[in-house]
Structure formats: structure tokens, C-alpha cells
Amino acid sequence: MTPLSAFETEIARVTLLLASDFGIVPVSVEQGPSGTATRNYLAAEADGTQWFVKTYPAGSVLESVDAAARLSEYARLCRVPVAPARPTHEGRLTASYRELVMTVTRYVPDAVTANGRLTGRRWEAVGEAVGRLHRAFARHDFGPPRPGPADKAVDLARATARLENLVSRYAATPPATAFGRWAAETVREKLARVPEAERLLAAVPRAMVSQLVHGDLSGPNVLLRGEGVAAVIDFHPPVRRGAVWELGRLALDPRTVLAQPDWPEGLGRLAAAYHALHPVVPVQELVGVVRVTAAALLMSVYPLDEVLDGPGPADASLERYARDRYEAAAVLCDRLDEAEEVLCDHLT
């Protein structure tokens, strides 16, 4: 008898957990789009019902996965568009078997990610969804919004230390690929641009609203259907960060900035829709969203560190993403005055 491959073994374990813990007897389990650190599957029942199965790598802490799942369900109960979770027979949102940790939600059909696809009414729809999300999280037991130091939005001291460390490591291990050499040069350039990031952040309020956030709100984790938001997915365990930092991370995703030349106007409409639902964040802070996002992109080491720390050579998609982040930071800086003027027009 031919032994099962690692993939076949995991499919068998997923199928077993679906039946034993979630009461789902699938007629098929197929590999779906995977996340940065997860492997995902699509399971279908005989009646056509489809489920999205997320499996976490060995060593994942069950409590953290469960906390993220419960945060997602809390958002759904607050009328944020979220894919409903399938609880286990015991009412839990996670299940485990040996090294496998798993969650199950309803599959969201006929949807695309927000990667570079914010057009037309989608800008307002995304602003409304994030405004509803942040307003809901402001009432969560994790704690209400409160002022937090602006330097926590982009921690320049920490970013500088990480860049210095990466420059030293690249010097000690010169990269052998063209992308690696570009990454090493870009890290050195980023370190030289720390004063520019400081000037960007000097114009934002010294204290900015900090609150419970999604934790990984970006284009891939917002699903669109038509002109609306079909679902917000892939929540992280509860964490407190700047509301404007999270808003910019999604609205000014590098792929959107590069794909949509009219992003300043779209951003203005998105911010106005967000503020209408979550006015706790002051207008002055929202006007600073481009500065915060530009500084974050300028100082980020990801994915330039993957050349040294990744499991293998960077693939084409990672290379493209690295270059997109670099180019988007330049675009945000070049169009900063224009974008802030548009934001002021829409918010005041």
C-alpha cells in the first residue's frame, strides 16, 4: 500500500475534524487560497453548502486562534459583514487534532479581494465597513478608545534599529540574486530616509486614537462583491493599535495606490464614510492618514528581510509586492499635499 503524501495526510485530518467536531460530512475537500502562515481548504457538502477551512501551522497557540475567531464573531454580531463561523458540537470556534488547529466559516462565493480594486462606490462601502468595525470594537470588553502616543503608530526608534540590523546582515552575507541586491540597496536607502519619516510624522497630532483593531486589515482580507463589501476576514487576536494606522493600511494598500490614479478622491470619500460612523477619531487625525501610511511604508523592513529570513528564495509575487511597497511610498509622498487637501474638503 502506497503511503499517503503530507498533503493527503492533512486532507484526511481535515476531513476527520470536519465530521467529528463540526458535524460536516464533506463530499470534497480541495485546497483553497492560502494565507501568509496558514493553509486553507474549501469543503463542500452533498447539498452544495461550502465551507472555508483555515488550518494553522504546527506550534500555533489554540487560545490565540480561538481569540481571533471570537473577535470575528463579535464583529458579525455587531452587523459588520463577516463570514459566519461554524461552531463545534461543544460550541467552540476552533478544533485541534495532533498538530492541526482549525477553524471553519461559511465560504463567501462570487467575491474578489480588495487588492487594487477600490473603485466607484467601493470606496464608500469600505469606509462604512471599517467605520462600523471600529465603532463595534470601541464597545468591546477589551477597552474603549483612548489617546495613545503618535509614535506608536510608526515606532521610528524600533524601525531604525531593525533597518540598522538588516544593513549589517546584508553586509555580512552579500545576496547572490538580483532581487537580493536590490533589497540590500533599498534597506540602506530606507535607513537614510529616517529623517524624512520623522518630518512626515511631525505634522500629525502628538496623541492619536488607539483602540481594539482587526490587526491585519489589508486588501487580501476584505472581500468585495459588486459595489459592496461581502466580508471582512482573517481577524487577529485582540490588539490595540492606532485607528488611523489600520484605516491607512487598507485604504492605501500599495496595490490600490498604484492601480488607481484617482486614489486621493476615493480616499476622501472613504474617510468621510468612516467618520460618519466612527466620529471618535478626530478629523485632524484622519487628514494625517497619508502621512502615517507613507512613514510606515518608508520604514518597513517587510518583505526585504525575507531574502535573509525566508524559508527559500523569494518568489515572483513576493518580489513584486516588495517593489510595489517601495513605489507606493514614493507616490504617497509625491501626492501628499494633494491628498490632504482632498481629505480636508471631504471631512470639513
Image (tube, helix red, strand yellow):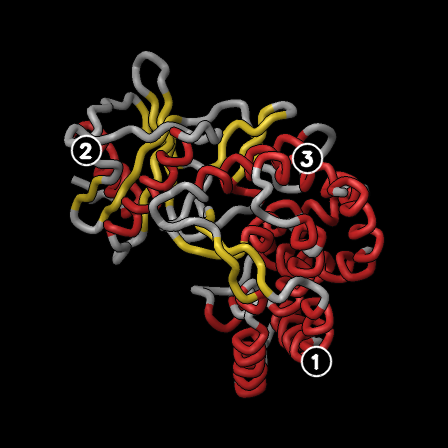
Q: Which mark is residue 123?
A: 3
Three-letter code, disc 1: Ala
State the separation of the CA atoms marked 2 and 1: 53 Å
Q: Is residue 37 visible?
A: yes
Q: Residues within 10 Å of mark 3 (few under 14, many from 20)?
A: many
Say which element carries label 3: helix
Secondary structure of residue under mark 2: helix
Residue 219 in picture, x, y percent from top left: 58, 43
Amino acid type for the residue under numbered disc 2 = Leu
Q: Classify 171 as above or below 294.
A: below
Residue at (57%, 69%) from the top-left corner? 151
* Circles 3 and 1 in contact, beta carbons < 8 Å: no
Nearer the camera: disc 3 or disc 1:
3
The residue carrying pointer 2 sits among few (fewer than 14), some (14 to 19) or many (20 or more) residues within 10 Å by Cα, namely some
Where on the picture, by quarter, is residue 92? top left
Q: Position of residue 139 (x, y in %)?
A: 41, 41
Residue 325 to residue 81: above or below: below
Q: Quadrant of residue 185?
A: bottom right
Q: Position of residue 196 (x, y in %)?
A: 73, 73
Task: Check residue 192 in the rendering and tell me which mark sits there, or answer none.
Answer: 1
Residue 235: image location, x then y, percent: 42, 44
Of pointers 3 and 2, the one earlier in the residue sequence: 2
Give the mark, 3 or 1, whose residue is nearer the N terminus. Answer: 3
- Look at the image and tell me in which quarter the C terminus lies: top right
Decide which of tag 2 and tag 1 comes sooner along the chain: 2
Q: Which residue is mark 2?
A: 16
Q: Quadrant of the N terminus?
A: top left
Q: Amino acid at mark 3?
A: Trp
Q: Is residue 48 left or right of residue 255?
A: left
Residue at 56% from the left image edge and 45% from the top image edge: 280
